[in-house]
Amino acid sequence: MSTKARNKVIFIACILAFIGLGMALYRHWTDRKPFAVILFVADGLTPSNLAAARLFNGGADFRFGMESMPHMALASPRAKDYAVADAAAAATSIATGQEVNRGSLALSPGGQPLETILQLARREGRATGLVSDTPLTDAAAAAFFARASDARDPEALALQLLEDGMPDEKLGGGGALLTPQQQGGARRDGRDLLLEMRQRGFDIARTKAELESTPGWRAPQVFGVFAEGDLAVAEEQAKYPTQPRLADLVQKAIELLQFNARGYLLVVNVGSTGRALQQSNAETLFRQIRELDEAVKVARTYAGEDTLVAVAGLGNPGGLRLNAFSFAPDRGIAILGPSPGGIPAVAWSTGPGAGNHLPAEATKTDPPQAKAEPSVEDPLVLLSGPDVEKVPPFTTLSEVAELLQNAM
């Protein structure tokens, strides 16, 4: 071999060694962040409800896809002033890492504003998205972008969607809260927030077709509003063919967000499960848990391996319990009927269905409870992706927030 050829070989070998050393140092010494972080939040994601939904949707041998996620924990949903949080305080805990009073959104008990994980992600250069199958002003969704001492003022919360630093992609329901009464909406201040959003440069989508036509080769700002109130639940979707399903919203959000070179954060609020619990509607709850599972499956498939996915329960209003007298092959409506002894399958602790597991003479003088209160049960947190093993098996939503914050 000539001297010139030998020098070329040595040069190439040195280059390859340098590249190999650089990759090794990057792999073992740098603080690698996941490209994508996707968080699902939902009321009713508890061990008892998940087991009941499993029986309803597929029978005794059925398993949800999210049950294959490699890490699981139970998270105590505490508020600062109550042992059990409501949806606003629970969502704020995971949005900010801080416990707040019940009814508060991203405000400390002393009234100080708290930074949410969506705002942290934007500060770190990530694209951000917020998806909800109920209005974006619902407490569990609003906790990630709004600050309020009272989560029960959706008109005021909707105004905060116009502020700087809001998510790049906002997809959900609640159209009536965005348009004035004279246009058929519910706003009393006369403002047309959809028009104002368009004037700020957002693409507006009102149907599934309009959302799907949004170009996926760029990263636009999209505001999708697909219902005047809640999006249709599973058993009603055939009546509303122009509405996207939750899984459709998640898939499109990922498609639009993934073009940001520094990664993205997507928050998905599955408010329909909380709606079902408030109404003592077990069938809808079980079907919506399956809708949640389909959306999680889409997230894990389309976002890729370098993704942190967290599915966090917020609480269990209503305190549902499914009595276990059904036969192993039973599924669907078959497991919701009464036992041979006349005992209803579903029992509720609070809310409109409270007391329906008791003999009629014990409850005939009791008025129905219009509102379901939270019951004491630790919701599930299901996790996949980098560093999920750092979350202890018995944890709090604030500790789960720490994992998400570190991933930014």
Image (spheres, grey):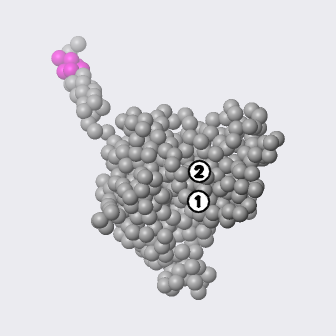
Label 2 belongs to which residue?
319
The answer to whether marks 1 and 2 mark residues whose Cβ atoms lie closer than 8 Å is: yes
SS type, badge 1: loop
In the image, residue 408 lies in the stretch drawn in magenta = no
How crowded pointer 1 is (Cα within 10 Å; few <14, some 14-19, many 20+) is rated as: many
Quick one: which residue is furthest to the right in this view? 340
Residue 58: image quadrant is top right
Label 1 belongs to which residue?
372
CA gap, disc 1 and disc 2: 8 Å
Q: Which of these two is toward me, 49 or 68?
A: 49
Q: Specify whether 5 is left or right of 266.
A: left
> What's the residue type where badge 1 is placed?
Ala
Q: In the displayed structure, would residue 223 be above or below residue 313?
A: below
The residue at 44%/64% (across/down) is 103
Residue 160: image quadrant is bottom left
Residue 271: image quadrant is bottom right
Rendering coords of residue 114 (x, y %): 32, 61
The rendered magenta stretch, by its main secondary structure, is classed as helix
Q: Specify whether 380 is left or right of 160.
A: right
Q: Which of these two is toward me, 219 or 163?
A: 163
Rendering coords of residue 318 (x, y %): 59, 54
Q: Which of these two is toward me, 252 or 291?
A: 291
> What's the residue type where badge 2 is placed?
Gly
Q: Specify whether 272 is left or right of 80.
A: right
Q: Which residues are magenta?
A: 3-10
Rendering coords of residue 2 (x, y %): 20, 15
The residue at 67%/49% (across/down) is 347
